[in-house]
Image: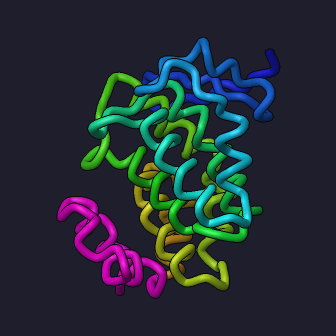
Amino acid sequence: MNLRRYRRGEATATLPIVFEDVDWAELAEAYYGDPDMQELFAALASDDENDIVVAEEELASSIMVCSEVFESTAAAVPLLLDLVSTARHRRASWLWLVGMCTDPEAAFGERLPMVQAALTAHVDRVIGFLDDADSDVAAATAYALVQCTDQPAARRALAEHPDQVLAAMKGPHEGFIDPVTDERLAEFIS
């Protein structure tokens, strides 16, 4: 299996380079025994809103249950970021999900550092979404990046994009972000 290793603190995450490298059956999954993850991700990129909604419900419970994250969550992070780059619908939703899965105020579990490492490994790619034409994507990006403020590039990008940070705090997801994360975001508004 072709893998990359990521480290955040003492936790090491081994993550796939491409979808086919993921052995989903071998990962600790949240709820479903072994859903056809490739089929789910294909449905998430669909043009059919109904397919997307059904797939999103199944995916969410396959990577996170009652706020607990798993190895499958870490493996899903780069794939969700691929969706942000390529999907036509719900792009901001995938970034909000990535942020939520890495937010220590919203997620927990022994694999949380692994999930956070997965996001940290892609921080440069995520930064690019701050300038997205869709303001909801930019706001979701700020929320995801505030989970990586141990990375100088993330801190710099958030400081350079106060409007997107404010949108994450006051946008359509207002009230979704917990007070601690809200305070962390507020650091970047001058």
Report the quarter where the N terminus lies. Answer: top right
Q: Start and end of the magenta stretch?
A: 162-190
Magenta-span inclusion, residue 163: yes
Looking at the image, residue 111 lies above or below residue 64: above
What x and y, as percent, mark residue 83?
Answer: 69, 56
Q: How is the image coloured?
A: rainbow
Front residue of 93 and 135 = 93
Tell me if residue 5 is in the magenta stretch. Answer: no
- Left or right for 56, reference 108: right
Q: In the picture, residue 21 is in which quadrant?
A: top right
State the count of labels.
0
Provide residue 63's location: percent of width, then percent of height.
Answer: 47, 35
The residue shown at (57%, 21%) is 34
Query: Which part of the image, by quadrant, shows the C terminus?
Result: bottom left
- Using residue 96 as the reference point, say whether residue 20 is left or right of it: right
**Residue 150, position as x, y percentages in the image:** 44, 49
Q: Residue at x 28, y 76 (%)?
A: 174
Task: Judge left or right: residue 102 versus residue 16.
Answer: left
The vertical placement of 49 against 120, above or below, is: below
31 vs 165: above or below: above
Q: Quadrant of residue 102?
A: top left
**Residue with the most extreme front position:** 50
